[in-house]
Image (spheres, grey):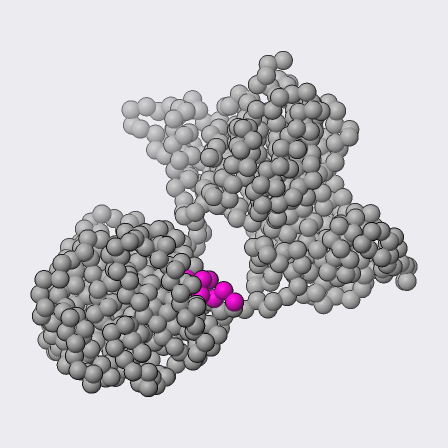
Amino acid sequence: MASEDIVVGLEIGTSKICAVVGETRRDGSVKILGVGQSPSRGVRKGEIVDFETAGKCVREALADAEEKSDVMIRSVLLAVTGSHIGSLNNRGSVDIPEDREEICEEDFEEVQAAAREVSIPPANQFVHSVLQHYYVDGQDGVLNPIGMMGRKLEADFHIIHGVGTRIKNSIRCVKELDINVEAVVFAPLAAAQVMLDLNQKNLGALVIDMGGGTSGYIVYIDGAVKYSRCLAVGGDHITNDISLGLRIPMARAERLKIEEGSVLLGQSRPGDRVVLKDETGFSGRELDREMLNTIIHCRVREIFELLKRDFEKGNILHFLGSGLLLTGGCSLIKGIDQLAEEVFGMPVHLSHSHTVGGITSPFENPQFSTAIGLVKYAQAMQGEKPRGWFSRFSRKLRIFG
Amino acid sequence: MIELPGSAQSSTADLRIKVIGLGGAGNHLLNRLQRDGVPATDLVVLDTDSQMFDSSEAALKVLLGTGVAQGLGTGGDPELGYRAAEESAEEIRASIDGADLLFVCMGLGGGTGSGAAALVAAYGQEQEALVIVFATMPFSFEGERRRALAEETLATLESYADLVICFENDKMASTVSAGTELREAFAMADLILSQAMRSITALMRRRGLIHAGFAQVAAALRAQNARALFGLGEADGTHRALTALERALQSPLMDRGRLLSDVHNVLIHVAAGRNLTLDEVQLFMTEFNRHIGERTRILFSAAIDPLLGERLSIVIVSALGEPIPVEVAVPRRVPAHLEIKKAEPIAPPVVVEAYSPLVTAPLTGLNVRNVSRTAEESDDIHPPQRLPEPAQVQFEPATRGRFEKSEPTIVDGQDLDVPTFLRRNAKAGQGR
């Protein structure tokens, strides 16, 4: 087993920090060797607000992962998220020089550079440019143009960008631990790698990753990333709503959300009460269950509705043959799939990591899909470039810092 | 320094200001000004293309060169623009008659603007008006040739106008994100120009405890091969002084204030309601001083404007470039009642890298009362007329719980950190 086959995915999330050590295999599968995690502090809405505290948590999570996997971690792939991440689609185009007819590698580089000549806010940097489709002399459906004859090469890219300094902050947080950051990956993009197989990507799928601080989505249509976005509202907001609405401490609200909360209304009998046991610093309470569920329902429905508005514009919902896949910690809330089905009007799967082998059983948990997805993403990067599904990704990943 | 008698100063509020929109770009800007409102200012549009008049909201429209251009425009030929202006010399003179201060707004690189601007400026000077040219550099995608023509026109204009302020269209639209309609990108440029013009007219027109007039503005903007900086910020609340400064500095063109460290003169103007305190001024000036170099001269100006209410407004005007030695102490054609504190050599063209802090409220009217250190008596204040306050998106302080101190998530004007059930006023069992 060569050491470069070991990949570590690190997600600095709002509620927990998670490091997944995985082994990528030639046959395209991924074996998880160990998962380290630590509760996250100093992170709000997917972004680091307390550098030192967050750094300590990252150290804990990585140490935990090292211990469990018996692997020394030297470099990681880092997931980034946050409201500053934006995306757009753009087409790059290059003319093949007169003296040659064959399209070669450098044309690909050039077409990608051309696609990046798009105005993004000055403070922003490119995170990904994901290849969607090639066109050779205006003809589409070209999967691999290298070696083909043509006068003009065009390519559509999905460009994801974010505020440079904020991305660098996350990177620095890891680098201070003397650990190299190989690449940064937009979190929902990583999560989608583990949740979707090639077939589902071709059919079209919507992946919504509802984490603690942010809710992001990725839309695949015709096997290519078509849309992505990040909304800085997540599970933390639900907890906050419960805490404010029912006047209970945050920590208690978090537990209540996990243990008792549901997004379904009208399921409880009138007068059904939730009993909160008294504990240190908190005298017991009885709460109306319907009120609790209403608070959660309102928030989750709102998040779905906000995301859905994006899709209504382009009539995207009709192109999603594989339906909606929900992941992230929030997808554990009871009844969330039913609510999502009601809002989006399409089949909803609560998808967990199923395309990886190894000691996954304890980790078949949507909370880990982003970190596991990073390993899967790295595998795709390692694969032979012009072939395999990874040809759809840009070979050059921006590495910051 | 030439100090004119006090009587001259008190009449600056009665300045007769005319704004000339020249050609297509000028016409668009005038429409914008008309909508934003510039009190007691005459707007005149001069164009060779009669079709442009349909969309014009200016009070006075003059068609140039009915003979040479036949109301069809110049087709981008400055020579034709020049001849059209020559032909309509009398009409132009009549339209600018009686102005003390003449703003000429035009887009460089075209036919009408580039051809006629110098003539219009010259006519203005004949009439002893102070001429300030607001010019926009073409977008870089419009091509090298157009830019070269623009540069050339700019060089000519400097000898005809008292101050030439040049805005880079590229820079003004740099804050526009991808996918923005072209119309919006142009509208952004117009908005910034409108803000800059209104700020500067405010500086010119208003009298305060300490006055900063044309001399100060020109001093701040005067530099060789200059790229001028303009920023405007307004804020209210506890930290309004620093917030307003932050917003004014937020210009990417100033590189968040970093470019200010190299300027030689900078004019900073603050206006607030009655409760502007010394503490506040000290607070933001201390902060502001961090952004400028040791040798930078600050032209400070402050104003009390009851109509601003609780808000505080900061305007920063400066230019980046080589300073021009003040050689002559001969004021040029200055209307007798125009307050002049300083000798006025011809101002060179100044390229303003403007920035519009879109998040802040637009410049409220023209009442940024200017106070400079030179002179003044406080009983001199009579609040000039003021436009209605522009609608400002105000987020009511609501319960945000643990997100109290974090960056708000705002979508469609709703603060998503506030619990949904509170915003939707949901009762138990009601989903929506």
| Residue shown at the point (43%, 73%) measured from the top left | B276
Instruction: Give the quarter of the image for residue B227.
Output: bottom left
* Total tally of numbered discs in the picture: 0
Task: Give the left or right position of residue B293, taking residue A283 as reference.
Answer: left
Residue A273 lies, in percent from the top left, at 89, 58
Residue A152 lies, in percent from the top left, at 37, 33
Q: Main secondary structure of the magenta part?
A: helix
Residue B159 in the magenta stretch? The answer is no
Residue A232 lies, in percent from the top left, at 60, 51
Residue A119 lies, in percent from the top left, at 40, 47
Q: Which residues are magenta?
A: B238-245
Furthest residue toward top: A1
| Residue shown at the point (64%, 19%) measured from the top left | A25
Q: Nearer the viewer, residue B81 or B371?
A: B371
Specify whether residue B317 is in view. Answer: yes
Tell me: residue A66, above or below residue A337.
above
Residue B242 in the magenta stretch? The answer is yes
Instruction: Give the quarter of the image for residue B27.
Output: bottom left
Quadrant including the C terminus of chain B? bottom right
Instruction: Give the quarter of the image for residue A389.
Output: top right
Q: Nearer the viewer, residue A366 or A401?
A: A401
Specify whether residue B29 is in view. Answer: no
Task: Give the left or right position of residue A298, taking residue B229 as reference.
Answer: right
Tell me: residue A357, above or below residue B16.
above
Quadrant including the N terminus of chain B? bottom left
| Residue shown at the point (21%, 64%) measured from the top left | B219
| Residue shown at the point (22%, 71%) measured from the top left | B214
